[in-house]
């Protein structure tokens, strides 16, 4: 006599002890895999020379006081500067910076972002004979505002190559191209918890053109183990298809963001469009050709980065060797499929990208370049 459907179901269903055994096996395999990969990354990291030069200068760093997401950059730069200068004074743009500079008498005052920094304070500092520098963090998206700010400083540093000529045409005598980097104490290889592990991840805000792109790949991402974190993702036409994969409105700190990058097999990087409608003050239409800070942070975590093309990306990473690029939704899908099924290639590119980031793109490297531009050959570390 044939068994009832209920009996057949009971026969097919693994016992609890068998399920537990299978779970332990999968967990051990996953843990071993991530642990082995983490060990490989650590081996590479130990062979990368560290920044040790101390500049014999007194620097004054003026942080933004804007809060998140600028506060992690403020903290990372302050910590890095403290380890590479003879003396460091830290303040922010809400304090009486000119009075503090008059008392401290630094060799250089470095202002980050500067959009909220009172310009009369900068004028007063320069009147004291103290050199001033501004490092713009959001070029070219606020150039209507930075065009007024830049000429008031002795030195202008911009993370966007296209803005160098823009500031020179405004009469700024000393304009330097210096993209942001990353803080290796925060962005580095880690062994992430299981809940952070996904096939594909993206961290960032849903600017309108970015949302339009993600709408075109929504069906594909819905079929994958994907994860998206950031604000405005309810803008998606296909939001309901992805809502279970989106941490909506989440602002993650550097360590949590690093854990997400480490937990993904592939991290998507999509740059903000220079003409996007959201929070854009770029009436001159200055194009964006330089990589964003996320480019360096992702690479530092030894995760395969799949990024859209920016023309100056090649100055920082070698596409196909240290990073992978895409130029359309279909190309992105094809490359995700390819690298998810070619484990060795994916990991080789990821570890080469990490090596390049740790060697060339830390905040220590960037600030060392800044000081070379400001002081060499008169002062050397």
Image (tube, grey):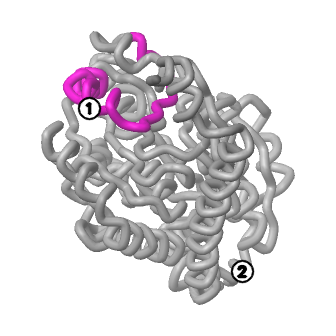
Percent x, y of residue 232: 44, 16
Note whether residue 200 is visible: yes
Label 1, label 2: how far apart the Cα atoms are: 50 Å
354 with respect to 14 (left or right): left
Instruction: Report the residue at 15% width, 46% height from top.
Output: 331
Q: In the rendering, which numbered label is found on residue 220? A: 1
Percent x, y of residue 268: 36, 45
Identify the residue under disc 2: 54
Q: In which quarter of the image is the C terminus?
A: bottom right
Secondary structure of the residue carrying tag 2 is: loop
Q: Can you say whether 19 is above or below 84 in the image?
A: above
Q: Do the residues labelled 1 and 2 touch (CB within 8 Å)?
A: no
Q: Which stretch did the figure color magenta?
A: 209-234
Q: Nearer the viewer, mark 1 or mark 2?
A: 1
Circle 1 Cα neighbour tier, 10 Å, few/some/many (<14 / 14–19 / ≥20): some
**N-terminal label among 1 and 2:** 2
Which is nearer the eye, 276 or 2?
2
Which is nearer the eye, 95 or 189?
189
Instruction: Report the residue at 39% width, 20% height from top.
Output: 242
Note whether residue 124 is visible: no
Q: Can you say whether 95 is above or below 321 in the image?
A: above
Instruction: Report the residue at 38% width, 11% height from top.
Output: 240
Instruction: Tell me which secondary structure the magenta stretch mostly adopts.
Output: helix
Q: Examine the image and state in which quarter residue 356 appears.
A: bottom left
Q: In the rendering, which numbered label is found on residue 311? A: none
The extreme front residue here reads 1
């Amino acid at each position: 006599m044939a068994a009832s459907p209920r009996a057949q179901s009971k026969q097919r269903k693994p016992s609890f002890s068998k399920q537990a055994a299978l779970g332990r096996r999968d967990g051990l395999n996953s843990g071993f895999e991530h642990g082995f990969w983490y060990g490989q990354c650590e081996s590479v990291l130990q062979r990368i020379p560290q920044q040790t030069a101390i500049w014999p200068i007194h620097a004054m760093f003026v942080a933004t006081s804007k809060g998140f997401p600028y506060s992690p950059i403020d903290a990372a730069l302050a910590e890095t500067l403290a380890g590479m200068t003879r003396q460091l004074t830290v303040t922010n743009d809400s304090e009486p910076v000119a009075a503090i500079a008059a008392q401290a008498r630094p060799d250089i005052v470095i202002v980050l972002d500067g959009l909220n920094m009172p310009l009369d304070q900068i004028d007063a500092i320069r009147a004291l004979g103290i050199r001033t520098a501004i490092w713009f963090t959001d070029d070219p998206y606020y150039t209507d505002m930075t065009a007024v700010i830049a000429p008031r400083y002795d030195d202008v540093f911009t993370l966007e190559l296209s803005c160098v000529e823009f500031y020179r045409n405004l009469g700024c005598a000393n304009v330097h191209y210096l993209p942001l980097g990353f803080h290796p104490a925060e962005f580095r290889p880690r062994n992430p918890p299981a809940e952070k592990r996904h096939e594909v991840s993206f961290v960032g805000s849903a600017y309108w053109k970015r949302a339009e792109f993600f709408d075109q790949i929504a069906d594909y991402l819905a079929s994958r183990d994907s994860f998206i974190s950031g604000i405005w993702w309810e803008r998606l036409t296909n939001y309901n298809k992805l809502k279970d994969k989106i941490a909506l409105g989440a602002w993650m700190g550097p360590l949590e963001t690093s854990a997400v990058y480490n937990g993904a097999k592939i991290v998507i990087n999509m740059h903000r469009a220079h003409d996007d409608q959201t929070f854009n003050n770029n009436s001159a239409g200055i194009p964006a050709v330089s990589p964003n800070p996320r480019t360096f942070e992702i690479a530092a975590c030894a995760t395969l980065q799949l990024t859209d093309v920016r023309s100056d990306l090649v100055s920082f990473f070698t596409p196909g060797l240290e990073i992978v690029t895409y130029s359309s939704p279909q190309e992105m899908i094809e490359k995700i499929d390819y690298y998810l099924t070619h484990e060795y290639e994916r990991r080789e590119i990821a570890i080469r990208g990490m090596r390049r980031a740790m060697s060339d793109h830390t905040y220590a490297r960037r600030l060392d370049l800044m000081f070379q531009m400001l002081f060499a050959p008169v002062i050397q570390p």
